Image (cartoon, coloured by chain):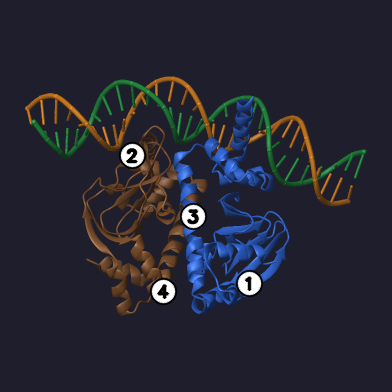
Chain colours: A brown, B blue, C green, D orange
Amino acid sequence: MFDLLQQTMRRYVAWQPKEERQFIEAFVYREVPSQYRLVEYGEVCREICFLNKGCVRLYYLTDDGEEVSGFLFTEGLFLSALESFLAESPSVQVLETVEPCELLVLPKMKLEKLYEELPKTQVFMRKLLEERFVNAQKVVASFVLDKPEERYLKLIAAQPDLLQRFPQHVLATYLGITPVSLSRIRKRIREMKK
Amino acid sequence: MFDLLQQTMRRYVAWQPKEERQFIEAFVYREVPSQYRLVEYGEVCREICFLNKGCVRLYYLTDDGEEVSGFLFTEGLFLSALESFLAESPSVQVLETVEPCELLVLPKMKLEKLYEELPKTQVFMRKLLEERFVNAQKVVASFVLDKPEERYLKLIAAQPDLLQRFPQHVLATYLGITPVSLSRIRKRIREMKK
DNA sequence: GTTCTGCATTAACAAAAGATAAGAACGTCA
DNA sequence: TGACGTTCTTATCTTTTGTTAATGCAGAAC
């Protein structure tokens, strides 16, 4: 139940067995169905979740009620509406499961306690953030450097499982284009291969 | 000379006077001219710089030798080619000054020493990264949500000084468009206002 | 002052994406 | 089985951007 979390923890920090237990014990196991909103629009996000199984999309709402993907999460990632979580402000980001999910939930209060009582928590979070920031920079780089077609090709090369697990209109907005345009791009690629 | 750094430090962490001195003493003051490359393409970045005065652009090189902006730095920000810095790998990001700059340079070795000897360094860096990550997420959100014209308007609303300090072709690629297209957008906006 | 160079603008055309609507494929549920 | 809803596809048209090239402008070098 905590295997993947443990693995992930060890990838960044060398914990003492006692520290490891202390950290893990701060999490609460929780199962949620598909299409479940972990964070609603306008709600203050007060927890960070480790995604043990399943997948989740982060999206924004446009003026005309459309949903535009901002990030796609799969197993092994920590997820939260970070801006809301940090500032305790109403979230403009919605977090919604795309499959039934197993989560390990860390409430903000407990994280703050860990920061004080278990200093390696600081190191762990810093390293997680470093990785996520570098990742975000790469996404930005892809937006300024590549055309939508290239972004799509890079995406299916880097994370082919996303294609199976997320509907295409979700992938399309994640790439910054409309579902119609993604469909055309896919067709162009199909023709190319012939 | 260290005023802005000190201010920035205090915004995130409550330091003891002694800790503050210890942290600041790890930095080396350095002046560089305009158009100076702090990190070359393919070079391993081994330091983090605090930008005390001046401005810097981060850019990528395309296959045909074009420069595409990935980020624009102004006073008060920490800059480095983070992926290269962390992995000690050749950088695909180039850092080049756009004005004469005053830098406070923190070599990687010294940062690692601080991480061990001055635990608040961990807290400070984590909080810096949180802020930068949230910022990067907003940039991504703007790419998936807004049209180039809106991105430009938001940019000049949020950071009007960038317009004065960076040439327009640099701003254009930062917005993910060509200089020609930005010129057209600016014209459209001019016509609108009449 | 004159030349040179780099940058912003404008124009004209090609290529791609957005918007809208209509049809096809698929699973769900009565 | 059949009706419904959702998603993906396809078609048409409009809008925008990319591309290339020409023009204008201003600062730097001589």
The residue to which callout 1 is attached is B27
| Circle 2 SS class | helix
Tell me the residue that label 4 is attached to.
A119
> On screen, C20 above or below B115?
above
Between label 1 and label 4, give the one nearer the viewer.
4
Q: Nearer the viewer, mark 4 or mark 2?
A: 4
Please state, as top left, top right, bottom left or bottom right, where the C terminus of chain B lies in the image: top right
Calculate the distance from the C-alpha at mark 2 to the C-alpha at mark 3. 24 Å
**Would you say the residues marked 3 and 1 are in contact, meaning their CB atoms lie under 8 Å apart?**
no
Q: Earlier in the sequence, mark 2 or mark 3?
A: 3
**Disc 3 chain ID:** A
Please tell me which residue is depicted at 43% across the width and 69% down the height of the picture.
A122
| Distance from the alpha carbon under mark 1 to that under mark 2 | 49 Å
Q: Amino acid at mark 4?
A: Pro
Disc 4: host chain: A
Please name the residue that numbered disc 3 is placed on. A137
Front residue of B105 and B67 = B105
